[in-house]
């Protein structure tokens, strides 16, 4: 396996670990409660944690400060809006964990976050060349 392929796989593994930590292990009730209200500090804090961890991973991957800032900021904004949109959709429909549609929405949300990491990794690979 080439060094570039190893680098890419390690970066993707880092994004997976970061997502587990930020979305599940470190997310507080305050963060969860604010996701459906636009501009709520809890949702903003949650998205900022994602962006901050991604900045650290991109720094470890050897990207420059400008690329790190742009990619981490893009992820922060996108993560915030994906979460806000999911919560807004769920709340408008009054869906809870008892409804199959809740789990479908959660699955789509998680899939979109994973696509974000693939895009970030692809962009990082291009910027590191």
Image (spheres, rainbow, N blue to C red):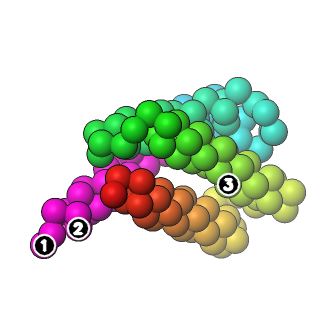
Per the rendering, the mark at residue 10 is none
Indicate which disc, 3 or 1, sits on the residue closer to the N terminus: 1
* Residue name at image x 60 percent, y 46 percent: 74
Looking at the picture, how far across and down is residue 128, in whole percent?
35, 53
112 lies left or right of 13: right
* Residue name at image x 86 percent, y 57 percent: 92
Residues in magenta, as a range = 1-27
- Front residue (pair 42, 3): 3
In the image, residue 43 lies in the stretch drawn in magenta? no
- Decide: is 60 above or below 40: below
Looking at the picture, how far across and down is residue 62, in whole percent?
30, 42
* Residue name at image x 67 percent, y 36 percent: 43
What residue does disc 1 label? 1
Q: How crowded is mark 1: few (under 14 residues within 10 Å), some or many (20 or more)?
A: few
Per the rendering, the mark at residue 5 is 2
| Front of the two marks 3 and 2 | 2
What residue does disc 3 label? 82
């Amino acid at each position: 396996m080439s060094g570039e392929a190893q680098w890419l796989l390690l970066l993707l593994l880092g994004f997976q670990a970061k997502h587990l930590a930020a979305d599940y292990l470190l997310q507080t009730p305050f963060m969860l409660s604010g996701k459906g209200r636009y501009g709520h500090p809890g949702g903003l804090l949650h998205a900022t944690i994602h962006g901050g961890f991604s900045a650290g991973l991109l720094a470890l991957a050897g990207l420059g400060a400008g690329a790190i800032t742009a990619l981490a900021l893009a992820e922060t904004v996108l993560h915030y809006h994906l979460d806000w949109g999911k919560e807004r959709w769920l709340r408008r429909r009054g869906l809870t964990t008892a409804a199959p549609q809740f789990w479908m929405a959660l699955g789509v949300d998680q899939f979109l976050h994973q696509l974000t990491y693939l895009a970030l990794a692809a962009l990082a690979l291009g910027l590191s060349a």
